[in-house]
Image (tube, rainbow, N blue to C red):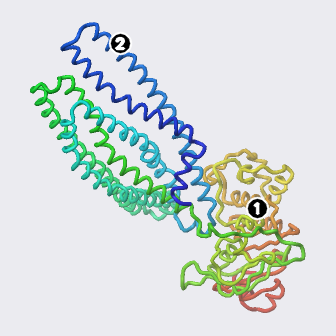
């Protein structure tokens, strides 16, 4: 999605509120000019007027103050209602686009970049783009209105103001070009800093066990210093714009006072006009002081919107996919022909894989660490679309199938389980509603019945399951997948955190499920369990080196038999 489409989101279903906010801002900017006229009349009537004229002006001024206050209150109401809807819509859309990405595309960016884009960057966009546009409109209307009045009072004094302000304004705008680059650098450094803090807290136990507090503190200080240095440079750029603009204002003010006094002495204008002129000059100077900074900040905020647009863009976003109709009984299952895959160029992880996973059968995938078992499972699930060779699901090439259709047909139980800071029930159901009987069945087959009995379905799991053991978290992940009743169930070391008895019980529960295809990556070579699989696939160094049932592979006496021997089978 391009940045301009993201910018449209601010105004989608929000146009009326935006229009009212801009209208009241414009009215407010114009009526803010009139106090200068009132000052001029009050001063002149105090010198040459009457008491009656003074009282009439005071009464008019009070009425005017009421109108101005009403306008300010209306502007406040409309502006902040627009802001609320705009920021909500933007942040919701950004999150939806990020989570719509494929697993492979999502993994190309650090999660800290996404977090920074949804928090710090949104704050900057809110202040510098959304709120800033009202300040820009205010200044752009107030300055011309004041300029017209100044011309009406004295064209020569207006000319003096313009001559004194042109060069400083140009200088301030030139400096403002640096702000956009610095804003992006602040965002990048902040994301890097957040990533480091996340890693340090996640690895707190390791840091303590290795007594590495001082070393990690040094790393933290270094990153913290780098972040604050770029933020300091960003603030200095803002301050420099302010200094240049402030200098312009001071020079202009002194010059206008001097020239106005000269004209007053010569009798060409009144003292009231001089005061009104100086007041209106502020309505020009304030935009001169603030507009360069506001425009620079707006440009910087647009840069952050563009960055968010790049995060929300999928490489295959324009590709047309076909829906997946599912697997048919007796039909073709999952077929891999001459499949290869690399995370990095020249580093092949899988090499010439040829497999046929038949519908409704169970397969164990075994092998040493780094043999490619998990990568094979991820390929089957469609996590990495840039594979070599052919992978077909029910006869359809995977690369042509809508990824969401693949996820509808498959479910995976990962080794590393993430638990949301919510109840056990909502973690199992993944925030959806299911039939109670179906839920109870999944809980029982996953071995969660005792936990539910002891703690209840509404027990709070804590951040990433802090209140649960590793085995309990693993059982929740298994129940999640069993609950979906999909056509293909993938398990990647799903029972690694369970004791041997529970592990065998859960694996047997998976094998007992009829009518679905089961692919189970396992490091436990238990004869009773392995004999139940229709086929065992043995991997080594990214290749399939053996296939067959338990009895056949043991009889061959090759790599699988040696793995079983090492494990004490």
Closest to the observer: 211 or 457?
457
Please tell me whether residue 536 is drawn above or below residue 35 in the rendered image.
Answer: below
Q: Residues within 10 Å of mark 1 (few under 14, many from 20)?
A: many
What residue is disc 2 on?
59
- The circle drawn on residue 481 is 1
At 46% from the left and 24% from the top, the residue drawn is 70
Q: Nearer the viewer, residue 307 or 42?
A: 42
Residue 7 drawn above or below residue 250: below
Q: Which circle marks residue 562 in the picture?
A: none
- Asked if the residues shown at circle 2 and circle 1 are in contact, with their CB atoms under 8 angstroms apart, the answer is no
Q: Position of residue 2 (x, y in %)?
A: 53, 60
User: Would residue 310 be found to the left or right of residue 398 on screen?
Assistant: left
Q: Residue at x 67, y 72 (%)?
A: 378
346 with respect to 281 (left or right): right
Specify the quadrant that holds the C terminus.
Answer: bottom right
Q: Give the number of callouts.
A: 2
The image shows residue 126, relative to residue 560, as above or below, that is above
Mark 2, mark 1: which one is toward the viewer? 2
Q: Residue at position x 62%, y 59% from top?
A: 99
96 over 548 or under it: above or below = above
Residue 492 place in picture, x, y as percent: 70, 70
Residue 233, position as x, y percentages in the image:
30, 55
Q: Secondary structure at mark 1?
A: helix
Can residue 204 be seen? no
Q: Secondary structure at mark 2?
A: helix
Mark 2 and mark 1 lie on one chain; the one further toward the N terminus is 2
Residue 458 left/right relative to 289:
right
Which of these two is toward me, 352 or 301? Answer: 301
146 and 419: which one is in front?
146
Q: Badge 2: how crowded within 10 Å, few (<14), some, or many (20+)?
A: few
Mark 2–mark 1 Cα distance, whole angstroms, equals 76 Å
């Amino acid at each position: 999605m391009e940045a301009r489409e993201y910018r449209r989101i601010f105004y989608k279903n929000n146009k009326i509120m935006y229009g009212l906010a801009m209208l009241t801002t414009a009215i407010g900017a114009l009526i803010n000019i009139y106090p200068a006229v009132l000052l001029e009349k009050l001063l002149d009537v105090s010198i040459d007027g009457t008491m009656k004229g003074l009282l009439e002006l005071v009464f008019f001024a009070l009425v005017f103050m009421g109108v101005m206050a009403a306008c300010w209150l209306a502007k406040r109401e409309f502006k902040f209602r627009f802001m609320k809807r705009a920021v909500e819509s933007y942040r919701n859309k950004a999150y939806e686009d990020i989570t719509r990405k494929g697993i492979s595309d999502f993994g190309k960016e650090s999660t800290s970049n996404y977090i920074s884009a949804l928090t710090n960057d949104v704050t900057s966009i809110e202040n510098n783009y959304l709120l800033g546009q009202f300040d820009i409109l205010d200044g752009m209307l107030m300055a011309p209105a004041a300029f017209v009045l100044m011309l009406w009072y004295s064209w020569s004094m207006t000319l003096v103001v313009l001559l004194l302000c042109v060069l400083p304004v140009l200088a301030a705008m030139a400096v403002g070009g640096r702000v956009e680059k610095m804003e992006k650098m602040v965002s990048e450094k902040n994301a890097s800093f957040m990533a480091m803090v996340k890693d340090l807290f996640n690895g707190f136990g390791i840091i303590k066990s290795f007594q590495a507090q001082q070393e990690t503190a040094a790393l933290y200080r270094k990153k913290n210093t780098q972040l604050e240095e770029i933020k300091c440079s960003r603030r200095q750029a803002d301050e420099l714009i302010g200094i240049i603009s402030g200098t312009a204002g001071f020079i202009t003010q002194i010059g206008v006072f001097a020239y106005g006094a000269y004209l007053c002495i010569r009798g060409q204008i009144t003292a009231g006009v001089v005061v009104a002129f100086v007041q209106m000059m502020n309505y020009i100077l304030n935009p001169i002081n603030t507009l360069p900074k506001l425009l620079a900040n707006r440009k910087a905020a647009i840069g952050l919107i563009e960055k968010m647009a790049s995060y929300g863009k999928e490489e295959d976003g324009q590709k047309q996919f076909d829906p997946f109709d599912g697997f048919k009984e007796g039909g073709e299952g999952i077929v891999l022909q001459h499949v290869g895959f690399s995370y990095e160029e020249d580093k092949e992880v899988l090499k010439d894989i040829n497999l046929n996973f038949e519908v409704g059968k169970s397969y164990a995938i075994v092998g040493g660490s780094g043999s490619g078992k998990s990568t094979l499972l991820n390929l089957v699930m469609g996590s990495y679309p840039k594979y070599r060779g052919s992978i077909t699901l029910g006869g359809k090439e995977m690369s042509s199938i809508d990824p969401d259709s693949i996820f509808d047909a498959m479910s995976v139980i990962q080794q590393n389980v993430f638990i949301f800071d919510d109840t056990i029930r909502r973690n199992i159901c993944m925030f959806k509603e299911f039939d109670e009987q179906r839920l109870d069945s999944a809980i029982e087959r996953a071995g969660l019945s005792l936990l539910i009995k002891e703690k209840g379905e509404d027990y709070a799991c804590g951040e990433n399951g802090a209140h649960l053991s590793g085995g309990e978290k693993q059982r929740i992940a298994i129940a999640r997948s069993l609950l979906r009743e999909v056509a293909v169930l993938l398990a990647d070391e799903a029972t690694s955190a369970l004791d041997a008895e529970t592990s065998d019980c859960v694996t047997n529960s998976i094998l007992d499920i009829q009518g679905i295809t089961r692919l189970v990556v396992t490091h436990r070579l238990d004869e009773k369990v392995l004999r139940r699989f229709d086929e065992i696939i043995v991997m080594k160094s990214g290749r399939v080196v053996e296939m067959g049932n338990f009895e056949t592979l043991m009889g061959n006496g090759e790599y699988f038999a040696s793995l079983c021997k090492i494990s004490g089978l």
